Structure formats: structure tokens, C-alpha cells
Image (cartoon, grey):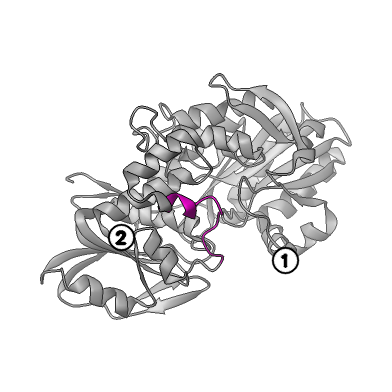
Amino acid sequence: MQLKYGKGKVEFDLPQNIQWQVLHKNLPFLYGSEDQTIDDGIYSLVKQLSSRVAPKAKLLFIVPDHTRRCRLEIILPKLTQELEQKFNAQIEILIANGSHVLQPEHVIRDLVGEAIYKKYPVQQHDCHDEKTLHDFGKTTAGTPVRLNSKVKEADFIITIGGVLYHYFAGFGGGPKMLLPGVAAYETIRMNHRRTIDPQTGRFHSHCHEGNITTNPVYLDLAQVIDFVPNCLSLQVALDFSGHVIHAAAGPILETQKEICSHVADVYSLPLEKPADIVVASAGGFPSDVNLIQAHKSIHHAFQAVKKGGHIIVLAECSEGIGSKSFLPYFEFGAAENIGRQLLRDYQINGHTALALKSKAEQVKVILVSSLEKEIVKKTGMIPVESFAVAWKIAEKELDAGSAGYIIPKASVTVPIISKP
């Protein structure tokens, strides 16, 4: 068996005394060619822009960072050519880092493609750089909407991104390209704190994959579009190989909802019952670039395992934890204590610390990574350096004939158990 790990693979023999099932989706439908799908999406976008964009307009593309790839290297050359021919447009590109750390220039060059990088101004959003931020107002819930000032300066904004399930915002992409994508740290913090139920200090029950109708985080961040009327989007759905299978263009919320149905078709996986053990790969780089990103895979693996069961997660975490504000929460010990602290003083990624600690208290999470062992232990997980060592720990508590699931791309696969 081979599973992706960082930019390489981990190979191991499956123990024979477990009833294994590999969780992947066999799509019952066929999509057209990727090039044609992208071309159709671009054609639709350009047609809608025709009545809204003047010649020589200043256009701002807002695109996702390296942790949320969406085939920009194919989309951007096609789209820029169309817009230059149609409008003689002046194009800038802004990387929607949200609260993520800034990346080296070679990462950005690889993300957008060499030709685009050389031809157009490409800048990374920095949520902490006050001089680059503009105040747009407040949401009805009181979140201050401060965005990158390039949003204010542009004649028109085009967001480009992929839609996937998101473990607390319901779905990624859509309005998240603006908030948290190009928002100030305090804006992101105020929005993300809505993951914590103020009555219980626990993770809010409405903050979960697929829910954008009653989700307090999504309902708040979606209001960002009210402050950016000069904006359209090109949004895509990808298959497990990372190829575009559907593209749609138009207003951000409506376009996202169209893509969501395709995401559900591809990535949700109904299961009859949970397993005794789950072996999950994040799917390699960039899905396992740090622990914050790897938690998405732990979250999905957790949904497929019995309470008291075992999870073995393969996630290299080559860039470490992913946030300075994450690890200190584990100093408070139990998840209940972390929740209380979050109610007193919420910081970005605090909800992820709470979510991870809660899982580690309910199942044994064995992490194969390059992280320091003491860091992993602090989170409540069990650190190991290889699958072989992980299996020695897990097999001691597994009976012959136990049920096991293997999730090759746990970062995006969402198990749905019908009989928990």
C-alpha cells in the first residue's frame, strides 16, 4: 500500500488480520475535458464582465494561496489573454493568504506560473500590515470589515478559486476569498471566534462541513460581499487528482452554491458504520504542509472511527505547526479548559486547538510526521516516525477481524456515517 506523505510516499504492507476498506469515490458520471470546462467558465465570466468593465480598467484578481490550489497555472494564462484582448485591462494579482504566513517568492512563482509571475504584479496579502488595509464597515454581527486596500483601489475585482468542504465554515472558496482571504487579522479573529458556542465553550454545533444556512461563521463572513459590489468570481470544483471538473462564473454566493453540489457529489462518502481503526493520509503536500492544515485530515478520519478507536495519520508537517497562536492553547490541558480560555480571549486557530484536543480525548490519534515529539505529545496525540511504529501501538488493542478504513486523501474526503 502506498500513501502520499509530503512530496513523497510511504509504502507499507497492510496487516492481514484487519478487514480493510479503502475509501475512495467511484464517480458515476463523466465530465468533459478540463481545458473545455475552464474555457467555458472563462467565456461565461468575460460575457458577464462586458457590461460592467470599461476599457483599460484596473482589474484585481484575488487567488488562493499554495494550500488551496485550483489550477491557476492553467486558468490565469487563458483568462488574462481574454481580458487583455477584450478590455485592454490592467491586471494585478493578490494572493489571499488570510492569516497564513507569507511564502517565499519561489512558491508564489510556482503557484501562478512563471509567465504570469513575470508579466503581472503579484502581491501576497499580509493580514498584519496595517498600512495595506482599508476599513469598509461592519457586519450585522459586529465584525469589522477591514480588507486589503487594493480591493478599494481596483475598478473591478475577480475572485478565482476552488470550492471544497470546510470543517467549520461549511464550504471553502466563495466569499472566503475575501474574508478571511484578504482581510485584517482582527477581522478574521472576530469572524472565526464564532466557531465557539458562547453558552458552552465548545465547538458550535452548526459549524460543520456542508452547512452554510445556519452556520454563524459563514453567515457572518458572507456579508463581506455587501461591501464589494464591483466583484464577480470564477469558481471551480476539482476531482481527487486535482483536475477541474466543473467551472462556473458570476456573483460570489450564487456561483459558490452552484459548485457546492458538485463538491458534494465528489467528496462526500456515505458509510454504514464507523471502523475500529482508520489509516489516513492528508494527501501529501500541500495538504500536510503544517499541523493546522493536517488537522482537516484528522477531522475527517475522526468522523469514520468508533469512539475509543484508533487513527493513524500520515502528515509530514514540513513547515511545522502553522501558527504561533496554536500551540499555547494546549498549556490549558483538557479541551474543556481550552474552551473556557477561548471564551475569555479568542485568538485565531484557537478553535482548531480545541477541535484537535477534543478528538485526542475521544480516540487515540497516532501521528506520523516530522514534528518534534514533545510538540505532538502536548496536543494529546501520539508521535511516531513511521507507519510500522504506529501499527505496533495500535495493534495491541485491536482484535482479529476488526474493521479498518484507509483514506488516501483525507484532507478532502468527508465520511458520512449512517449508523454511528
Q: Earlier in the sequence, mark 1 or mark 2?
A: 2
Q: What residue type is labelled 1?
A: His
Residue closer to the observer: 300 or 143: 143
Relative to 290, residue 299 above or below:
above
In the image, the segment drawn in magenta is: 319-330
Which residue position is annotated with label 2?
Answer: 23
Q: Is residue 29 visible?
A: no
Q: What residue type is labelled 2?
A: Leu
Relative to 256, residue 363 above or below:
below
Q: Position of residue 238 (x, y in %)?
A: 51, 52
Which residue position is annotated with label 1?
Answer: 106
Instruction: Name the side, left or right, on which 194 lies relative to 134.
Output: left
Residue 211: in magenta span: no
- Characterize the local packing of mark 1: few (<14), some (14-19) or many (20 or more) Cα atoms within 10 angstroms: few
- Characterize the local packing of mark 2: few (<14), some (14-19) or many (20 or more) Cα atoms within 10 angstroms: some
Residue positioned 17% across, 45% down in the render:
419
Q: Position of residue 172 (x, y in %)?
A: 51, 42
Q: What element carries label 1?
A: helix
> Which quadrant holds the N terminus?
bottom left
